[in-house]
Image (cartoon, helix red, strand yellow):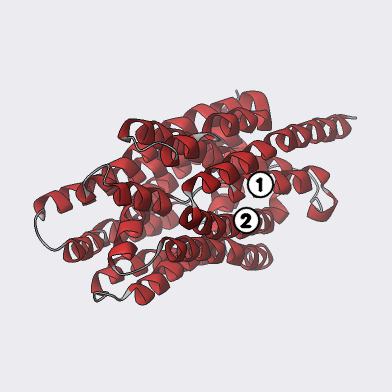
Amino acid sequence: MNNKSKKIIKPALAFVLMMGIVSMFSDMTHEGAKSIYGAYLYLAGASAATIGFVTGLGEFVGYSFRLIAGIITDRKKNYWTMTIIGYIFNMAAIPALALIPKNGWIFACALIVIERMGKAIRYPAKNTLVSFASTQLGEGKSFAIQEFLDQLGAFLGPIILFIVLLLKKGEDQFTAYALCFAVLGIPAILTLIALLTAKRKFPNPEDFDISTTLPTKLRLKSSFIFYMVSISLLALGFVDFPLITMHISKLSLVSSDTLPLLYSGAMLADAFAALLFGWLYDKKGIRVLMLSSAVSSLFSVLIFSFNSLTTAIIGILMWGIGMGAQESILKSAVTTIVSKENRSTAFGVFETAFGVFWFLGSWLMGALYDLAPNWLVIFSVVTQLSAIPLFYVTWRIMQKDKLKELK
């Protein structure tokens, strides 16, 4: 490695770490909130189908708008502006949940959707910023570092809420949850401070990417199309966590103030799985998603088919492993397939498809749960396993594309 390469790699690593800290505080906020969404909405009067619909709708809005945000970002090249605006919406909505009155689940649902909208605005731009640095460090490693710090925050957020709920044990649950959302305003503020510091230190991260490859047309990339179908099936069958917490709360497997700890465990599994699968991605490519999908596909069986805390915990850890692999590898693959000129749009297209199918799956699985939990289990397992052969096809096409580029 020459001195010039070292000069680029060191600041690239520093930038990835700084953006990872932003993600850590951000996830401490919104993943902490997510750990009690299901129980909170249930206390506010929402049914399982409503919770499935609303959380799915939030994800749908949060993912589908990323297409528009990605196109705008690629045209304007306003990476920092879109990132900052998105984080402001993203971080402001959660503390506002503390102001919701009892039986005000409609207002709570609106804020949840607004929070997801904020994530949609900033997501393509923020991932593109990190992708520029990833060309120096390795796509898998860069997004794995991001995901590890991201999920470290997602682990700490619910822990903080557990402490708050423990201190408020015996008091009105709804009021205790409102206090939790207010406390999450602290990491929300730290998120914005860390983000503005990163912008001041690295105003032009696009300079990290010195690749000379010609722009590629997304519509002509068969690898990208097969990849989209694969991740859509994965999203369709992946149960959103509020349904899991609602199920466990309904069965009284744990006390309500312990629910955040279950999410913390999932996020810890997510964090370490992200590091492992991110490293494996740089070695083995997209084939790694076949392994992670197979491992996590049975989580719904363990959570919803047995009235047992032990099997539920094992299922939640498997859910976390699946999430960690998805968060690190799915974004890495987009960076590998698409040139930097079209990358924000690609992230937008990818996230939109993922969100549409996540929404449809969440809504359908919420309705299936109301009929019988086993119907949810069957749907979840079958759709996730269906993605595995398509990931293999995607990998084969990517290998052929590489050979063409070398000729």
Residue occupying the point 68% across, 39% down? 387
Amino acid type of the residue that numbered disc 1 sits on in the rendered structure: Leu
The mark nearer the N terminus, 2 or 1, is 1
Q: Are marks 2 and 1 in contact (CB under 8 Å)?
A: yes
Does residue 172 lie above or below 144 as drawn?
A: below
Q: CA distance from mark 2 to mark 1?
A: 7 Å
Task: Report the residue marked by disc 1.
Answer: 233
Residue 6 pos. (x, y %): 54, 30
Q: Which mark is residue 135?
A: none
For residue 204, what is the image quadrant?
Answer: bottom right
Judged left or right of residue 88, residue 57 is right
Residue in the picture at 36% in, 55% down: 34
Q: Is residue 83 visible?
A: no
Q: Amino acid at mark 2?
A: Phe
Whether residue 117 can be seen here: yes
**Left or right of 350 in this view: 37:** left
Residue toward you, 294 or 163: 294
In depth, the one of 105 and 160 nearer the eye is: 105
Q: Quadrant of the C terminus?
A: top right
Give the secondary structure at mark 1: helix
Give me the residue at 56% from left, 28% from top: 3
> Quadrant of residue 50 in the image?
bottom left
**Classed neighbour count for the residue bearing mark 1: other residues with Cα under 10 Å, few (<14), some (14–19), many (≥20):** many
**Residue 60 figure quarter:** bottom right
Q: Which residue is mark 2?
A: 357
Image coordinates for residue 384, horizontal then vertical, percent: 62, 40
In this orientation, which residue lies closer to the viewer: 163 or 365?
365
Secondary structure beneath label 2: helix
Mark 2 neighbour class, 10 Å CA radius: few under 14, some 14 to 19, many 20 or more: many
